[in-house]
Image (spheres, rainbow, N blue to C red):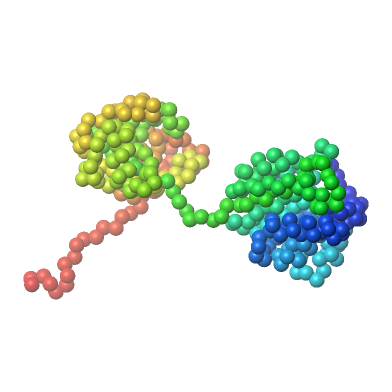
Amino acid sequence: MTTIDWDSLADSFDQEPDHGLLDPDVRAAWAARLEGWLPGEPSRVLDLGCGTGSLALLAAEQGHRVTAVDLSPRMVGLARSKLAGTDAEVLVGDAGRPPVGERTFDVVLARHVLWMLPDPEEALRHWASLLRPGGRLVLIEGVWSGTGLPAARLTAALALLTERVHHERLSADPALWGRPVDDERYALIARSATPRRHAEVVDVHLILRRGDEVLLARRSGTGYGDGLLNGPSGHVEQGEDVRTAMIREACEEIGVELTPADLRVALVMQHRGPAGQPRIGWFFEAEYGAGGEPFNREPEKCSGLSWHPLSALPDDLVAYCRAGLDAYRAGERFVIHWHEDDDPIAHTPGSQDRSVILPATHRETASTPGRSGD
């Protein structure tokens, strides 16, 4: 790891136009860029590796509330002098782990800082955690004489942490540097995800009964639970209700043409597969013979159909399907089945049961008081 003598660099940074912004034209060029990168309304800005506070001052002058951080006490002293008269806060601390406690910010700003940190990707992960929902990272970096960080590396890292990344090439604008430059200099503006309402995939499952038997399909070529048994099932598509989706899936998977009158709601289950996202599953019951004889209509996704006694189900079932069938047989109607990340996809006899049965309301029809015998 390279050791930086920040104190010895403080004066030289303040004298160079691309760090000190003492040249009025350079300062105006950076102010214009910053105005486009920062929110239009007053916001909380965290300036990391602030140096002598040049960008922090521009942000404060544009109406933002700035917290600036630098590792060098000497630079912090210079920044505090430069920011005197504003409400900016300047702290001594590591840019990679700024001393801001539990506070979050609308913007995390850093110029020529990431390339000096031992693990830039880890710093980005931490910085992203400091953003409020909908906040943004503003990163100014480059490659100078083979030293620095290429934009492609940071863009790839940011793609895993943020919703979208905007790249601006800065090398071609000599006003920013006080002279023409021919190396790679750029800005990346990465926006975090805007908070959204919770949403879950809705799927439908068919319990096709032949007396005590139920029809199961063996998964194949799907990439999830292949080789395991599962009931005929699928996802609700845009614009469908769950009953319509069940009729469509039954036709597509097993060639059975059901009608709404053939279906009865058997069970509703919220379930989550290992390391997966939550889903809502609607299980419908239908009797054998309704809609015709079932057959394997999707051999690319299913290696075969088979009937099994509901009272003696096989073990090689997808776990949440087995949990749903067990709850259905017990007469339950509402279930949560929540995998832990390291749980197997398959039902495992003797393992911890992840099912949580939710009690349903039972109401008896009551006669209106005083009306009996009318």
Question: In percent of the image, x 74 and y 58: which residue is there?
Answer: 32
Write down the quadrant of residue 148 in the picture: top right
Indicate left or right for 252 with 261 as reference: right
Indicate left or right for 228 with 136 as reference: left
Q: Is residue 262 above or below residue 19?
A: above
Which quadrant of the figure contains the C terminus? Answer: bottom left
- Front one among 5 and 316: 5
Question: In percent of the image, x 86 and y 49: which residue is there?
Answer: 179
How many marks the image carries: the answer is 0
Residue 283: x, y in percent? 31, 43
Q: Is residue 271 above or below residue 82?
A: above
Q: Is residue 80 above or below residue 345?
A: below
Question: In percent of the image, x 11 and y 70: which residue is there?
Answer: 372
Which residue ends up furthest to the left in the rendered image? Answer: 373
Residue 98: x, y in percent? 73, 55
From where the camera sits, is residue 228 visible? yes
Write down the quadrant of residue 80 in the picture: bottom right
Residue 335: x, y in percent? 36, 48
Residue 228: x, y in percent? 39, 30
From where the camera sits, is residue 100 visible? no
Indicate left or right for 333 with 116 as reference: left
Which quadrant of the figure contains the N terminus? Answer: top right
Question: In percent of the image, x 78 and y 56: which residue is there?
Answer: 30
Write down the quadrant of residue 130 in the picture: bottom right
